[in-house]
Image (tube, grey):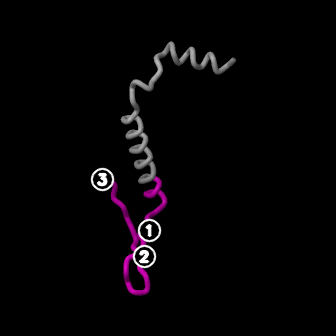
Amino acid sequence: MLNINKSYVTDKNKRLIAVQIDIKTFEKIEQVLEDHALGKLIEENIASENLTLNDAKAYYKNLRK
């Protein structure tokens, strides 16, 4: 698990309003979220929507015309 060093930001009434993390940690979190979302997208891909190799070749050949 990623150890996240954080600083809390409070308002004048000492209520927590935000958290600050260093940019390196933020970038790691961002990458994990993007990877997770991409993985979910790949899992949700319906196999019947995929082209066969020959169909893909024909499709791209027709695009060049």
* Residue topped by disc 3: 1
The C terminus lies in which quarter of the figure?
top right
Give above or below for 19 relative to 30.
below
Front-most of 32 and 51? 51
- Of the residues under marks 2 and 1, which one precedes in the sequence? 2
**Element under label 3?**
loop
Tell me the amino acid under the disc marked 1. Gln
- Of the residues under marks 3 and 2, which one precedes in the sequence? 3
Residue 48 has which mark? none
Q: Which residues are magenta?
A: 1-27
Residue 20 has which mark? 1
Residue 35 placement: quadrant:
top left
The residue at 38%/40% (across/down) is 40
* Residue topped by disc 2: 9
Front-most of 9 and 52? 52
User: Gap between marks 3 and 1, in whole Å?
Assistant: 19 Å
Tell me the amino acid under the disc marked 2. Val
The residue at 60%/19% (across/down) is 60
Tell me the amino acid under the disc marked 3. Met
User: Gap between marks 2 and 1, in whole Å?
Assistant: 7 Å
The residue at 44%/46% (across/down) is 34
Residue 37, x across and y down, in percent: 41, 44
The crowding category of the residue bearing disc 1, from other C-alpha atoms within 10 Å (few below 14, some 14 to 19, many at least 20), is: few
**Element under label 2?**
strand
Nearer to us of marks 3 and 2 is: 2
Which residue is outermost to the top? 54
Q: Are marks 2 and 1 in contact (CB under 8 Å)?
A: yes
